[in-house]
Amino acid sequence: MPTAPTRPRGVAELRIDVVSIFPDYLAPLELSLVGKAAQSGLLDLTVHDLRSWATDRHRTVDDTPFGGGAGMVMRPDVWGAALADVLTPDATLVVPTPSGETFTQRVAEQLALEPALVFACGRYEGIDARVAEHHRAAGGTVRELSIGDYVLNGGEVASLVMIEAVARLLPGVIGNPESLVEESHGEAGLLEYPVYTKPPSWQGLDVPEVLLSGHHAKIARWRRNRAIERTIARRPDMIEALDPSMLDKADRALLTGHGWLPGEDGRFHQA
Ligand code: SAM
């Protein structure tokens, strides 16, 4: 029997269903903050075994590709039956795939605003393309998303990544919501500054003096400068994308000092 969601809906901030041929792969969702969010009812999380919807004796979910070539493709009829049971009209279908749009913090923010998400974990050469096509044609929202430019064996790890990134944005999941504000890939468009804790001296390395000063304005400026410098060094593409209206005088001076100059569009480019 298909394991269709049976719990009462409506109290959770977000409903997430994951369909996979390896439901055990999703066990980490029971741990840490995501696990706690599920236990406390902030998140309504259900994992389904795709094979429950297979109809033959061997519970087959794949077949050879039309047009030939290596590998197997997941059958649309099995996925169709599963999604007919799991995917409610208000849910967004998320299909992890290396050929998808890149999953970023902005996408995580968009998904966190949805009432329900269904993750369809592919294996082999992926899911028959008609599954996404069919749900789009039926008026459903489908997001085909890649977690990066590399190929995994299946969509389970990609789903874990996306679910964790989305779940931590739900109100009440992170103890102190302020910790989300200055993070890498946040509104500022920068990487986070380096962070330190006790002891103040370790292995001959001292915590920067200013962080021990208690001078809030100086600490904020120091952190902002380090965030900009780290972003210049590691992700110049993010500096190019910075919204100039978010940069103050000191930011501009720092960027110029590192050889970044404002172009006609007001954005900073490497000189
Ligand atoms: N033949 C596919 C291609 O070249 O695009 C790759 C299939 S991959 C071996 C099997 C499954 O792993 C995919 O259907 C998808 O669910 C998942 N997957 C692999 N890499 C991924 C990535 N970078 N992002 C999201 N999902 C990925």
Image (spheres, rainbow, N blue to C red):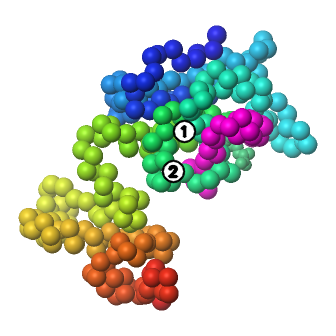
Label 1 close to label 2 by CB (< 8 Å):
no
Is 229 within the magenta? no
Is residue 95 visible in the rendered image? The answer is: no
Q: Which residues are magenta?
A: 125-151
Q: Residue 205: x and y, percent?
A: 20, 66
Q: Nearer the viewer, residue 17 or 258?
A: 17
Taking the view exactly as shown, the residue that stands out farthest to the front is 139
Q: In terms of depth relative to the viewer, which is nearer, 200 or 28? A: 28
Dividing the image into 4 quarters, which one contains the N terminus?
top right
Q: Residues within 10 Å of mark 1 (few under 14, many from 20)?
A: many
Q: Amino acid at mark 1?
A: Ser
Q: Which mark is residue 159?
A: 1
The disc, 1 or 2, on the residue closer to the chain's N-terminal end is: 2
* Front-most of residues 90 and 252: 90
- Please report the residue visible at 74 percent of the width from the left and 39 percent of the height from the top: 137
Disc 2 residue type (three-letter): Val
Task: Kindly identify the residue that appears in the image at 34 percent across and 82 percent down.
Answer: 252
Q: Residue furthest right?
A: 67
Nearer the observer: mark 1 or 2; the answer is: 2
Q: Is residue 141 shown in magenta?
A: yes
Residue 85 against residue 154 in the figure, above or below: above
Percent across and percent down for residue 22 are 60, 27
Residue that badge 2 annotates? 107
Task: Count neighbours of disc 2 (C-alpha within 10 A) and say few if under 14, some if 14 to 19, many if 20 or more.
Answer: some
Q: Is residue 88 left or right of residue 112?
A: right
Q: Is residue 239 above or below residue 95?
A: below
The outermost residue toward the left is: 214
Please tell me which residue is depicted at 48% across the width and 54% down the height of the picture: 106
Viewer can see residue 249:
yes
The picture quadrant where one finds residue 245 is: bottom left
Per the image, label 2 sits on a secondary structure element best described as helix
